[in-house]
Image: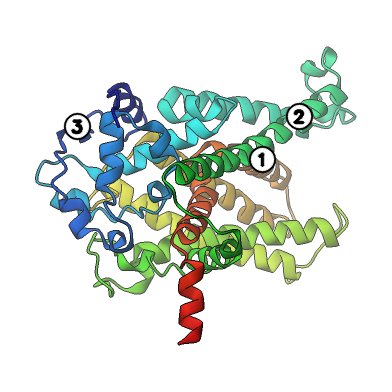
């Protein structure tokens, strides 16, 4: 089948990379990256096939491939590439490009392709959320903006904004799923709906246990057992960040559902205790992430885009202000608690708004990719029956 080569795709992806030196066009498909990648065992041509798609402009195939999200950036492919094409950084840039293409608002494209775009989106959200949190009836917190913008109008904007963000996340996942479905049907792949629940269970198990992630250690060596202590391995750092964040999210949700807003709580209140523990665990992982990016010694920490710094810094600031708030609220002379809590809530709302637009989106796109991969490679119905008969 004839295909017209579109070199613009590679240029667009490069705009989402960590540096101007990203030159995956140097790749001549030798297959070295596939040979050394621990995740290529059950996926033919990974990651080489992704690079080839970008080189010839196969955007529909690239955006519909679940392999794009299965890379854990161990960096072994980059370390051993004879052409210094930096496949690991290409995969990161391609995922950022995919997030921008899945998002219908255009904000992900603006935030992912430039530093100033990211800052502009962050500033817009921060200003809006700050206005939403100001009590119009409190003279001490009143701003002149309310002289011509009614409070109910600003709150309505907030509701609409979060609705658009939620819709963007749903549409992004739907777009990825729909592209996957169309391409697999075009390829003649038989996708059985009966195998879909099993694929979901398999993906959730993998996401929780990080079994494949553990094959890549912090030095980029794809070995089953890392030479580093477990508390410094990449998969463990990732698990502490995500696990701590989920613990804080659960604590916040339970606190909202079970405790009246504004009512006092002791330091040993279960939800407050869960949130504090989750925050400490998350902050541990984030400190290692930022320290390794600062040292820029090993792949994947050697090259960092603004987005690589922005998300962990924003999350760390949110966690820190939350932990400080939990401490100062019990101090006898609490004069700054309200201000710190205000900053914490604004940052937390920024995180929610930026969830489907930033690197944080990997959390659900990668999970969906694991589902699609397991579903695509589920045993055929005939094979299942034959195995049962044996």
The reply to whether dot 3 and dot 1 touch (C-beta < 8 Å) is no
Residue for point 28% across, 63% down: 41
User: Up-down: is 240 above or below 130?
Assistant: below
Q: Which residue is mark 3?
A: 25
Q: Which residue is mark 1?
A: 349
Q: Label 2 to label 3, Cα distance in Å?
A: 42 Å
Give the SS element for disc 2: helix
Q: Of tags 2 and 1, which is closer to the observer?
A: 2
> Is residue 69 shown left or right of residue 208?
left
Which part of the image, by quadrant, shows the C terminus?
bottom left
Q: Which mark is residue 253?
A: none
Is residue 267 visible in the rendered structure shown here?
Answer: no
Give the SS element for disc 1: helix
> Is residue 106 shown left or right of residue 335?
left
Give the SS element for disc 3: helix
Residue for point 19% across, 32% down: 25
Q: Which residue is mark 2?
A: 160
Label 1 neighbour load within 10 Å: few <14, some 14-19, many 20+? some
Label 2 vs 1, first from the N-terminus: 2
Quadrant assignment, res 92 = top left
């Amino acid at each position: 089948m004839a295909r017209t080569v579109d070199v613009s795709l590679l240029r667009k992806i490069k705009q989402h990379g960590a540096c101007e030196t990203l030159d995956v066009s140097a790749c001549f498909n030798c297959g070295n990256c596939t040979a050394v990648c621990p995740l290529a065992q059950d996926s033919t041509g990974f990651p080489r096939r992704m690079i080839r798609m970008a080189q010839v402009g196969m955007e529909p195939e690239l955006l519909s491939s679940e392999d794009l999200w299965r890379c854990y950036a161990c960096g072994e492919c980059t370390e051993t590439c004879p052409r210094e094409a930096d496949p690991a950084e290409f995969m990161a840039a391609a995922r950022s490009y995919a997030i921008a293409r899945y998002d219908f608002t255009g904000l992900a494209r603006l935030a992912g392709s430039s530093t100033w775009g990211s800052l502009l989106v962050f500033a817009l959200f921060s200003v809006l959320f700050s206005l939403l949190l100001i009590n119009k009836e409190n003279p001490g917190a009143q701003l002149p903006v309310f002289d011509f913008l009614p409070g109910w109008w600003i709150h309505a904007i907030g509701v609409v904004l979060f609705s658009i963000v939620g819709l963007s996340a749903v549409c992004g996942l739907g777009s990825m799923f729909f592209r996957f479905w169309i391409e697999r049907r075009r390829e003649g792949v038989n996708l059985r709906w009966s195998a879909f629940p099993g694929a979901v269970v398999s993906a959730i198990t993998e996401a929780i246990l990080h079994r494949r992630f553990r094959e890549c250690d912090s030095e980029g060596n794809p070995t089953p057992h890392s030479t580093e202590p477990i508390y410094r391995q990449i998969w463990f750092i990732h698990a502490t960040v995500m696990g701590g964040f989920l613990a804080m999210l659960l604590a916040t949700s339970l606190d909202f559902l079970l405790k009246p807003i504004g009512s006092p709580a002791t330091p040993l209140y279960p939800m407050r205790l869960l949130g504090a523990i989750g925050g400490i665990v998350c902050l541990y992982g984030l400190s290692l992430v930022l320290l390794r990016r600062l040292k820029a010694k090993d792949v994947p920490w050697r090259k960092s885009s603004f987005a690589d710094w922005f998300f962990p810094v924003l999350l760390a600031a949110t966690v820190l202000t939350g932990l400080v708030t939990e401490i100062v609220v019990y101090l006898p002379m609490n004069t700054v608690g309200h201000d710190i809590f205000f900053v914490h809530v604004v940052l937390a709302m920024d995180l929610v708004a930026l969830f489907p637009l930033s690197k944080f989106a990997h959390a659900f796109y990668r999970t969906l990719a694991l589902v699609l991969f397991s579903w695509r490679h589920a045993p055929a119905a005939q094979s299942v029956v034959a195995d049962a008969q044996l």
